[in-house]
Structure formats: C-alpha cells, structure tokens
Amino acid sequence: MDYQYFEEESDYIDLDEEEDLDEEAVGLDYTYGKAAELDVEEEAEDYYVGGEEEELLDGYGVLGLLETLKSCVEPSLLQVLQYVAPMLLLCLLCRLLCLLYSQRRRLTSLAPLHLLHCTCGLVLLYCSLGHRLLLLLLLAAVGYLLLQLLRLGRRGARLLAILTVGSQFLYELLLWRRRSDWPQLRGIQMVVNMKLISLGFDLTASSAGGGSQLQARIPGPLAYLGYIYSPATCALGPWVSFACYMDCLVPRNGWLVSLRRLVPNVLLCILAVIVSNCVAPALSDFFGDSSHFLVMYWDALSVRSSHYFVSIMAQALLVASDQGLDGIGASSKESDLLGPLVTQPWRIEWPRSISSLVRSWNIPMHEWLKRYIYAPSKMDAGISSRARTYLVSSLLHGMDLRIYLVLISLAVFAEGETLLRRHLASALDACISANHCPGRQRCRYGHCPSKRGWKSISSWLVGMTNLALTALTIFHLAYLGVVLVGDALKFGDEADNFLWHWRQAGYLSHYIGVATFVLYLFLS
C-alpha cells in the first residue's frame, strides 16, 4: 500500500509521550489538585435526616470541586511562571542581540550569532538542570565526534543514527538505579539525537547521487553548538533542521507581529496547565463513582493537557526567537494567530480518525520521521518501512514499557481503522475515509456533504458515520492515554497499577482494534 502524506493517511505513529519527557526535562513538577476527602455520611447525621442525604452529597461534591479548583489554580500558575518567564526572556534577549549585531555591521562572519545562540541556550538549560548540564555537554561533544563518520557517506549517516540512539540507552542503563536523574535529561537528549540524525542525513544527501566523497561541509564546533543549544529548541524542542536554523539566525519578523503571536500562546499555556493540574483531576474525582469511562477520559485529558502546555510553550519560544519550522506546505504548519504550530489540540480533542490525531500530536516530529526514517526505508530492502518507523519512534523515547504499549496499540488501531475506512469509502463512494475531507473541489467521493450539502439524506448518513467514528477515536484516546498518568511503572492488582484501567474496561479498545482488522480482512 502506497504511503501518501498529503492525500492519504499517516503510516506511522508519533510519540504519545513526548509531553512527559519534555516536562521532566525542564523540571516541571505537576501536582494534581485533589479534592479534600469529606466524610459525607458523618456530616449527614449531624445536619440531615431522612431523604436529604442525597442533596447533601451533591452539595458537598460541587463545593469540593470548587474548593479544589480555587486552591490549585494559583500555586500552579506561580510554579509555571517560574519556568516560563526565564525562557521567554532569554529567547527575546538572544533575538535582540542577534538583531543588533546584524544591523551594526555587514555580516562577514556568522560565528558571533552562533555564539549568542549557544550561550543563551546553555544559560537556559543551566537554570533548569543545574550541574546535570555537564552531562549534556559531554554527550554533545561525543555527538560532534560521531559527525566525523559522515566522511563514510550514507553508511556513516546510518551508523551515526544507531550510535546516537544507542548512547541514550546506554546512559539510561547506567542510571537504572537512579531513574529520577534520567527523565530530566531524556527529553532534551531526544531532541539532540533527532538534530544529529537529521544533520547526518542532510550532509550526506549530496553524495547519494554517485559522488565518492562527501561534498557538503560539516559545521564547525561553534555552529554545531549554536544549532544544538539554540534557546528556541534546546529545552522543549521541537526539532528543526540545520538549514532552518541557519535561515533564522537573523530575525526577520517585526516585533509587533511576534508580540501579537506571543500573547495568545502564553494565554493558551496558562489554560493548558490549569486544565492539566486542576480541572481534569478534579473532574476525575467528581465523576469517580458514576462512570469509569469518564474517569479514564479526565485522567487522560490531564496527560494531553500537559502535552499541550509543553507544545504551546515551545511555540511561544519559537515566536520569541523568530524561529521557523521545516516542512513542505508550511502554510499548514503556521498560523497567523499563533505562528509556527507544534501541535493542533482542536484536531486531537475532536479527531476524525486515529491517524489524523497522530499527525496533529507533534507536527515537527511527524515531519522528521517522514523525511529521515520512512522515506529512506522505502528504498531499502529488509525490514519494512512501517516497522522501521515504529521502531525508531519507540527507541527515541528510551526504555518505558508504558510508551511501548501505547505506541504499538496506536499503530495497530490506526492501521486497521485506515484500511477499513478506505475500503468502505471506495466501496460506498462516501467521504468516510480516515483523512479530513479536502473540500468540494478536491474530494473524490460522490457522497460528500461538501458537494451535496446537508439537504441530502446521504450527506446526513455520511455525517453520522463520521461522528460515530470520531466518538470511537475519543474512546481509544482516553483508553490509551490513561496508562500514562503518573511517572511510575507499577505492577500488581492495586489501583495504581498502570494497567488497572485497561482491566477495568475489559480491554475493550484492544478488542475493537482487532475486530477492525478482522472486519477489513473479511470485507476485502
């Protein structure tokens, strides 16, 4: 089956857990607000008799919810501002210094610009990591030495990719008994590894046509450090290519444009952290006795909101630094209101399909996997491009069984759903495929609401079908995301076991995923 990125579904699964890694990288310590336990029965005996206990329960539930939100919002905002403000100030300072340097003299050398980026980025990381920054510098030095393998050509780039990912595993194994140290660094090192791998493949691309020697020049140490530790991307990501970094060394957008984009990003960050820390946990407690699905949904929303906070904060840093993103069709990755888009929460919370959700989860990483893993693997023999892409996306996140389970489940669910919906869409000539409808002019299906309007019965049937499939995707999203709550991998029969929610749900989502594949095979 051909993989078409812009007309068809996504063929691989982005990581569902980058948000946890990035939050840990900057030292965020989210403390979920929990409602104070109320002894309702004891209070009911003191104040109420007969059938009024039910009213008391409702009253204390609402009051407890409001009290939780009130006591949680202010500490969460103060905690976040301690991290957000220094990052934004350093990015703005770096941009201002680069702009002043570029205006005072002709750019005969880019070395001062690289030095400014590297210095501001290291100061930013030191404020978050302290002495642990020394380990990152050591790994960066090892990475630059590994870049010399590019003189071997394309084989050197592949060897570089293997060794960079392997170094991350090696350090995690060495600190297995001190797991609290590694999560603060894993997210940062993952972005560094992605930059190294992309740099290796980009520099060897010119020699792929038949030249025996590498034609592209390996960046000098200062340019390399400026790229790796640029303040716009070193702490929270996202990945940007070396060419994109070079294009944005000198700021080009006006300050008013950046300010207009920076304010809504900061406001969305605040909203995301309030939902993650306060609203979602409080609603999970509030509905804890009514529906297990609602508990899963609100707990998973807390995880997703943490991801939104990190991603939108990364967008704010990009805007403050005037740093763009990579990718063909940049109009889909940049918003007039928010600037460069790292994530699209509106397409995650109301997804058309699992594959569309995955593409919107982390847009730069989707581009990285597509460009450097999937596309080259299509030309190679051996392991399939799909399996290789999933393997790389899993390895980049280190050793975490929860992430592996979520990723492989997403891969299976998305593939089965995409195949089944594509087959049904072709057989019924209806716009019910996994992709978003491209519009009236480009949609190839006859029964499409954008073509026939909502006065047609077929349009209503198509709309109801897509609505039901969206509801199913939301269930999958809650089911898979709930196992990522917390930062510990626990086994057993207790409620804090990371598989407890799946057992309570009877592994329903997995049964539906397998049934989707079976139904596709039966129909095809």
Image (cartoon, rainbow, N blue to C red):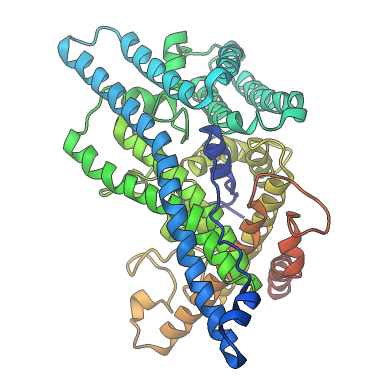
Image position, residue 194 (x, y; %): 55, 30
Q: Is residue 445 visible?
A: yes
Q: Quadrant of the C terminus?
A: bottom right
On the picture, is 467 further left or further right than 154? left
Is residue 8 something that shows in the picture?
no
Question: In this view of the protein, which residue sits in the foreground, 338 or 447?
Answer: 338
In percent of the image, x 60 and y 68: which residue is there? 38
Q: Where 252 sits versus 153, above or below?
A: below
Q: Nearer the viewer, residue 502 or 485?
A: 485
Query: What is the quadrant of residue 39 in the picture?
Result: bottom right
Count of number-bearing discs: 0
Q: Residue furthest bottom?
A: 50
Image point (51%, 44%), residue name: 366
Q: Position of residue 410 (x, y in %)?
A: 64, 56
Of all residues shown, which one is farthest toward the right?
492
Q: Quadrant of the N terminus?
A: bottom right
- Above or below, 253 relative to 62: above
**Quarter where residue 157 is shown:** top right
The picture places residue 358, in percent across and down from the top left corner, at 54, 53
271 shown above or below 225: below
Q: Give the quarter of the image for residue 318.
A: top left
Horizontal and vertical percent position of residue 137 = 55, 15
Outermost residue toward the front?
46
Q: Is residue 511 left or right of residue 481?
A: right
148 to 34, vertically: above or below? above
What residue do we see at 63% from left, 42% from top?
389
